[in-house]
Image (cartoon, rainbow, N blue to C red):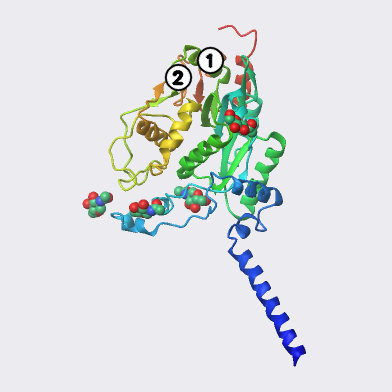
Amino acid sequence: MTEGFVQGIVLLILSISLFMIIYTVYNDKSFPYFCDSYHLNYECHMLSSVRESPKIDPSPRCERNISVEQIQNFSSLPTNIKDLLYYRHCRHFPMLLDVPNKCGGANASSDVFLLLVIKSSAVNYDRREVLRKTWAKERLSNGVWIRRIFISGTMGTGYEKKRLNQLLKLEQSKYNDIIQWDFKDTFYNLTLKQMLFLEWMERNCPRAHFLFNGDDDVFANTDNMVMYLQNFERKGGRKHLFAGHLIYNVGPIRSPQSKYYVPEQLYESKLYPAYCGGGGFLLSGYTASVIYANSHSIPILPIDDVYMGMCLARAGFKPEHHLGVRTAGLHVPGKNVDELDPCFFKEMLLVHRMLSGEMYTLWHRIHDPDLRC
Ligand SMILES: *[C@@H]1O[C@H](CO)[C@@H](O)[C@H](O)[C@H]1NC(C)=O
Ligand SMILES: *[C@@H]1O[C@H](CO)[C@@H](O)[C@H](O)[C@H]1NC(C)=O
Ligand SMILES: *[C@@H]1O[C@H](CO)[C@@H](O)[C@H](O)[C@H]1NC(C)=O
Ligand SMILES: *[C@@H]1O[C@H](CO)[C@@H](O)[C@H](O)[C@H]1NC(C)=O
């Protein structure tokens, strides 16, 4: 009888311990999420280091907001807009790839003069390769440092998604220049990408002097940018800078067929604040942090460049026009003229858009010491 009693006690203790172990593992919600079989060890490691960072929401799984169904005429909105409203409040996504030391740590980041932040979807491998060899090369330019980061989300599903994630990972191991978050890299998610980057910058590169923020299909004369920005700094006095192709007196497109469709339920006013076209713009590190601080209280608008304008306006800052930024392309006079004549580009800051091969040739031509214009 005593023997049976002891056995009973031992069994009881064992089952309680087992229950507690299962309970603990099961309740650690991040456990299956961060380190499921899909994520490889490296990512798990990256993700757990992200989890420890105090600025990031520890529960990245974001529930949809059912209350948005009460918004007027919700049911008649297109599916992608409905989706956007459901998940509009979700601003934290786990990182898949990170470059926390890109600027040498937060304190040393003042050594970075110009940080190039280039939006690039995973499939655009050839564009990234050519940018690394041309205008986005990390280097000293006129005595100051240029650094480069590509920002990306995920694409596709199943095996395709896996392959594209692997591509970025391979590139990362070679170049160490990619930040990737675990969200779908879609047109409507560009604002999210932009804001996640600003959050990253706050943490890892708060003292960089300037940012160039742009697409991976533009030609940017980064040496000219450095000279323009050095001149801006030399003049002193002002910390705010946001310059590019200025767009003003335009409002949301209300036709549901448009790529840029923004219904009243997303943005009520008929007019957007002034903003700079998203192909590429320059801003000071100071202005970047002001934009980020203001973004917390402004609901996401899926048009990323307009959203930046909204954050600026909230801060009481104005974007400005720079003649050297041609996001609508460059008009070259005459018929029998080479439209990629390096002389047209030598004085520009940015021209949209160009094929990889053209970019490669042009970069070499504008640096030709024998070039006469
Ligand atoms: C959910 O949607 C409602 C209606 O648009 C909004 O008032 C509320 O703030 C939203 N909740 C969150 C968490 O964003
Ligand atoms: C809702 O739909 C009605 C009827 O189609 C229309 O008159 C009204 O302007 C719509 N309201 C909004 C906010 O879209
Ligand atoms: C960065 O600078 C701050 C204050 O200037 C200092 O407290 C902190 O220890 C520094 N961090 C590192 C990693 O050097
Ligand atoms: C943005 O990314 C999230 C997370 O991957 C996804 O659920 C959502 O559908 C995307 N939004 C749009 C509008 O594409």
Does residue 348 lie above or below 15 as drawn? above
Disc nearer the start of the sequence (2/1) = 1
Q: Would residue 319 be visible to someone looking at this image?
A: yes
Q: Is residue 241 above or below residue 183?
A: above
At label 1, counting other C-alpha atoms closer than 10 Å, the crowd grade (few under 14, some 14-19, many 20 or more) is some
Q: Is residue 350 left or right of residue 147?
A: left
Residue occupying the point 30% across, 45% down: 264
Give the image location of residue 248, x and y in percent. Answer: 33, 28
Please name the residue that numbered disc 2 is placed on. 331
Q: Position of residue 195 (x, y in %)?
A: 48, 39
Give the number of the mark in front: 2 or 1.
1
SS category of the residue bearing label 2: loop
Residue type for callout 2 = His
What is the quadrant of the C terminus in the image? Answer: top right
Which residue in the protein does label 1 denote? 230
| 333 left or right, relative to 116 | left
Q: Which mark is residue 239?
A: none
Q: Is residue 14 above or below residue 244?
A: below
Quarter of the image holding residue 24? Answer: bottom right
Label 1: element kind: helix
Residue shown at 38%/44% (left/top)?
299
Left or right side of 283 for 19: right
In what quadrant of the picture does the N terminus appear? bottom right
Q: Amino acid at mark 1?
A: Gln
Q: Nearer the viewer, residue 343 or 24?
A: 24
Q: Position of residue 214 (x, y in %)?
A: 51, 30
